[in-house]
Image (tube, helix red, strand yellow):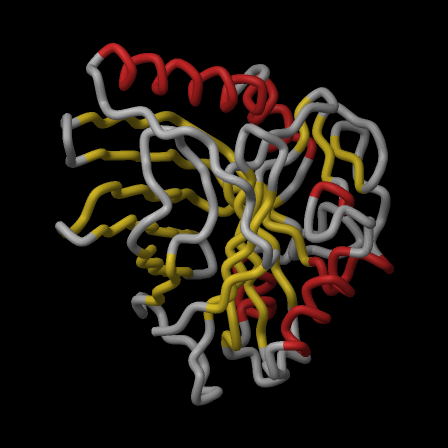
Amino acid sequence: MSRAAAIAAADPRAPLSDRDWRLVFGEIRHRRLRPAAHAFRYPAFYIRVPVHHLDGAARGNWLFGLNRGALLSFRESDHGDGQGRAAAWVLSQLAQAGIEADGALWLHTFPRVLGYAFKPVSFWHCEGRDGRLAAIVAEVNNTFGERHCYLLSDPSGAPLRQGQTLRADKEFHVSPFSEILGSYRFRFMDTPTRTVARVEHHDESGPLLLTSLSGELRALTVRHCLRALLGYPLFTLGVIARIHWQALRLFVRRVPFQSKPAPPARFLTRGSP
């Protein structure tokens, strides 16, 4: 059964014209191992967007808007090349890499809250026609307004497996407390009701940063939109505030500070298992 069919079967109610829209309630965990141990965890919520159905989707409910202003909203222009055609952009990237993904496209990301968004990382899940996962694109934004993507797939063309470790060289500046050295290890685990994404940054000495985003999937209904707005007030503004607060804590602990380099010449880095 494909992920689309499994999610639909888990909750037959249709909050929008496409019943596969989801809110995800969970948490973010982050742990630094060196040179000073540092860890934090925050409650969080995300949205899972059926990008393959956006053209025929409803405009949302009175709390949630698609490509329009609302208390909670999703805008295609926040992703990819910023031109506002999210599905076309990611499919063009896959085609250039020789990856055939002619099935469902899912985007796991932070929504806009009261019109504001900052999305440190978003994950595009790209399926083949048979419902199996052909590739994942990790889309990373830094606080300097720059964006870079990591394309994760199997060079042989084999579908990706649940929990499979996927690797990509680090090419993009994210934190002034981490050099552009080493590589990332990604692992993704999905069920019809729960999702987990783990990202590890390794350098020549081994694991350095361990991050995870996890949560329970819920229908994008008015009730769950209210839960998100009341339970996580000003959430996306809080994301950027917490990034700077954690940076200050690292600075006080004298973790070495790195100057910002020029962004990479390529917009997308190809990874592999």
Q: Does any portion of residue 76 appear in the rendered image?
A: yes
| Residue in view at x 37 percent, y 75 percent | 161
For residue 205, side relative to residue 263 (left or right): left
Residue 109: x and y in percent read 57, 44
In the image, is 108 to the left or to the right of 88? left
The residue lying at 74 percent from left, 62 percent from top is 89
Task: Look at the picture and state if 212 lies above or below 37.
Answer: below
Is 156 above or below relative to 41? below
Q: Position of residue 29 (x, y in %)?
A: 31, 35
Residue 231 seen:
no
The quadrant holding residue 146 is: top right
Expressed as whole percent of the image width and height from the top left, the position of residue 152 reads 46, 68
Specify whether 25 is left or right of 57. Answer: left
**Rendered view: 138 above or below 255:** below
**Quadrant of the snapshot with the C terminus:** bottom left
Q: Residue at x 53, y 35 (%)?
A: 142
Location of residue 259 in the rendering, given as x and y in whole percent from the top left corner: 42, 29
Q: Residue at x 59, y 55 (%)?
A: 265
